Image (cartoon, rainbow, N blue to C red):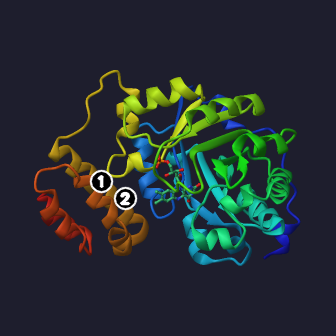
Amino acid sequence: MTNQIQNFKIPNKNSKNFWQKLAKPIYALAPMAGVTDSAFRQICKSFGADVVYSEMISAAAIVYDSKKTLELMKFNKKERPFVIQLFGSKPEHFAYAVKYITKKIKPDGIDINFGCAVKKIIKQGAGAALMDNSKLGRLIIKTVIDNTNLPVSIKVRSQVKQITVLNFLKHLADLDIKAIMIHGRTLNQGHSGPVDYNIIKQARKFFKGIILANGGIKNKQDVQKMLALTEADGVGIGQGVFGKPWIFEEIKSKKLKEKSDKKEIFKIMLKHAKLINKLKDKQGVVEMRKHLCWYVNGLKNASILRQKLVKIKDLNELKKILEI
Ligand SMILES: Cc1cc2nc3c(=O)[nH]c(=O)nc-3n(C[C@H](O)[C@H](O)[C@H](O)COP(=O)(O)O)c2cc1C
């Protein structure tokens, strides 16, 4: 923790709200730990994602100057608008982390995680536990807003224990939150099962900013259904991008055709691998194994390919497997 950051003066408020400038509907890459790293965000951007979120970043780890966490926040200007998502449970950690991000990292927005269902995170009182503790949740949002001039957004679930997103938003009515991504599933549902479209639609009564509806989007028809039923300003896409970063292009195109050409998919895999290799060297290619396996889903001989891809160690091995 440095004094330079603690004494940092917040530049002009409200000078940088990118959310207002985006054309609607907005198609966002939802934050996903272990998935939405810089290389993948760049690939999604190249296919037309309008806004991309980081993996969730620990506010405490920024305070403790964790090298790994500082690495996670690096981004390329091609990713803009780029939103960093923070998780945590201590307002003082958020205050420092947000000043640090505003001064040193300079993304386009800061998001706060109120939906994470991972036990380790809930135990710390962070993620979805924070939605269940609206007093602390509110204080954290206020602290974040007070310590940055960047637009602040939140990501919530339809319901956590007894508190619905509607009740939660009632507590936040006076706070200057610019956008909200609502995952239309309860904490108990995790990341699968039916999405509550109606509660997302009702959220409009309690929130005037940008609403992104999230949950279960796998293709263009799903987006159309989501937007029709929720009347949201846009959508957040999570698991639907697994092995399919071109989903943004498909959603935006007039045709309904889905990409299935093996050669074309292999070219994207290689482009993604080269990018990650540049950013993280061989270790990046190893980390990318899951993406590689997702990319070949549905292709002929997918299981044989997956058996090879799951063991891949570097870019040359990938080139041999893909024969390009
Ligand atoms: C592997 C994985 C990691 C995730 N990590 C995060 C995260 O870091 N922050 C967050 O707010 N949500 C996270 N989520 C939740 C997603 O952003 C999204 O809300 C959820 O997957 C539902 O959307 P979907 O049905 O389109 O996948 C994660 C989900 C998955 C599957």
225 displayed left or right of 146: left
Identify residue type, mark 1. Lys
Up-down relation of residue 308 to residue 157 (above or below) = below
**Picture quadrant where residue 170 is located:** top right
Image quadrant in which the C terminus is located: bottom left
Residue at 37 percent across and 46 percent down: it is 245
Q: Position of residue 259 (x, y in %)?
A: 24, 38
Q: Residue at x 57, y 57 (%)?
A: 188
Q: Disc 1 on helix, strand or loop?
A: helix
Bin the neighbour count of mark 1 within 10 Å (Cα to Cα): few under 14, some 14-19, many 20 and up: some
Rendering coords of residue 267 (x, y %): 22, 50
Secondary structure of residue under mark 2: helix
Specify the farthest residue to the front: 162
Q: Identify the residue position indicated by label 2 in the image.
A: 275
For the residues marked 2 and 1, what is the alpha-carbon distance in whole angstroms?
Answer: 6 Å
The quadrant holding residue 201 is top right
Q: Is residue 316 left or right of residue 129?
A: left
Q: Is the Cβ of the residue at disc 2 closer than 8 Å to that at disc 1? A: yes
Identified at 61% across, 69% down, the residue is 70
Looking at the image, residue 39 lies above or below residue 277: above
Q: Can you tell me whether the CB of the residue at mark 1 lies under 8 Å from the nearest atom of ligand 1?
A: no
Residue 320 coordinates in the image, percent (x, y): 13, 65
User: Is residue 13 in view from this perspective?
Assistant: no
Task: Work out whether 191 lies above or below 121.
Answer: above
Residue type pointed to by label 2: Leu
Q: Is mark 2 within 8 Å of ligand 1?
A: no
What mark, if any, has residue 271 been given in the picture? 1
